[in-house]
Image: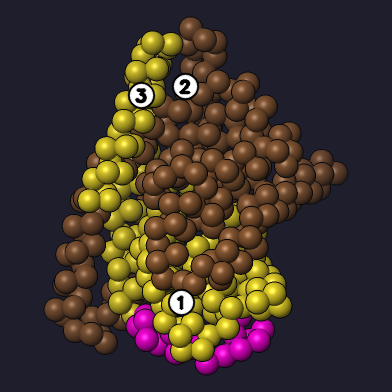
Amino acid sequence: MNILIGTILIWGAALWALAHLNRTAPEARPELYRRATETFLFMLPRLVVGLVGAGFLAALLPEAFVQRWLSAQSGLQGILIASGFGLLTPGGPFVAFAIGASALKAGAGAGALVAYITAWSLVSMVRTLSYEVPLMGRQFTLARVLISLPAPILLGLCASLLF
Amino acid sequence: MRPAFTTTQGVMSPDPRPRRRLFDGGFFFVLAIALCSGTGVLVTQGWERFRDILLSDLGLALLLLPKIAAGVLLATALALVLPKDKVLRHVGPESGIRGLAIAATAGAVIPGGPAVTFPLTLGLMSAGADLAAGVAMVTGWILLGLNRTIVWELTFLPPDLVLLRVLLSLPVPILLGLGLRAAVRHRARRQAE
């Protein structure tokens, strides 16, 4: 259902942009279709392989295992481990939140939890591989991931001091 | 560099993307991960589980194709439609903290997942936004996306903890953007020397 709504929304936006281009620069259309087709064909194999790989990765990381690790460690070590697991946790909007919630019940600290959610948000390998590399290219992805790496640890430390 | 394209509005920018081969290092990297993790699943969890995952993800890819196609069309069209001077002024390399804040806010409020936000970012960057603004937009979406925070995060996690995470995350898109701009400037200086 979510996919359907998203698809309709983004087709609406794309058609609006096309209509605008038609009015302002109709002669640019062939170039637009050429570029779009080229990009689409470039992404297609990456997206398919990325999604399948993401599915396999997800199956290899049992949730109970992550939850146990998140709640067992504390302090800086806990934050570092939590950041690492965040990186590995597969996408999907709620997987990491569900794991985080059960880890919290099992005794995980605020620092570890914030580090985990932040790392999962910023550098989740699965989303990065299946969407970002195909769509944005390696250069953008690499720059973004490298500059983001310290954030989960710093935010985790701040959270553990404040909470 | 590809040739510039002339339109009634003036010269359309040359295609900013580098020439790409269909199967390059990036593809083989993703392929290697899929093969390794696939083998791992096959060995530890058996053929049936392997087949189930493979089929369900191929199905997901098929389901996503129309969305991705629209995303690519949108990104490509935006690059041609958006007024370059305005994009440059608001989120270009000289847009300062304000530009990064605009990009991060856009990322946070625009609903939709990766198939929407990445193409929008790409379109904006082709129209003049710099790498830092692009990263600020993506970071705004993944750290502060309102949709995700309201719908999912608050369902699972206690509100005070969510608030703490969101408050701590607020400056992050801008800080990452500033860091990237500093890195780009540093690199340019080193190359000039």
x, y percentage for residue B68? 32, 43
Q: Nearer the viewer, residue A46 or A66?
A: A66
Provide the residue designation for mark 3.
A16
Which mark sits nearer the N-terminus, 1 or 3? Answer: 3
Of residue B102 and residue B11, the one placed in the foreground of this image is: B102
The residue under label 1 is A100
Q: Amino acid at mark 3?
A: Trp
Label 3 residue SS = helix
Q: Residue at x 68, y 50 (%)?
A: B174
Q: Residue at x 64, y 55 (%)?
A: B170
Residue located farthest toward the top when viewing the structure as drawn:
B8
Q: Secondary structure at mark 2?
A: helix
Tag in front: 2 or 1:
1
Mark 3 — on which chain does it sit?
A
Task: State which chain is coloured yellow.
Answer: A
Labels 1, 3: front one: 1
Q: Is residue A71 magenta?
A: yes
Residue type for callout 1: Gly
Which residues make up the magenta segment? A61-80
Residue lying at 54% horizontally and 40% vertically, measured from the top left: B106
B172 relative to A24, above or below: below
Tell me the subunit letter for badge 1: A
Q: Quadrant location of the C terminus of chain B?
A: top right
Q: What color is chain B drawn in?
A: brown
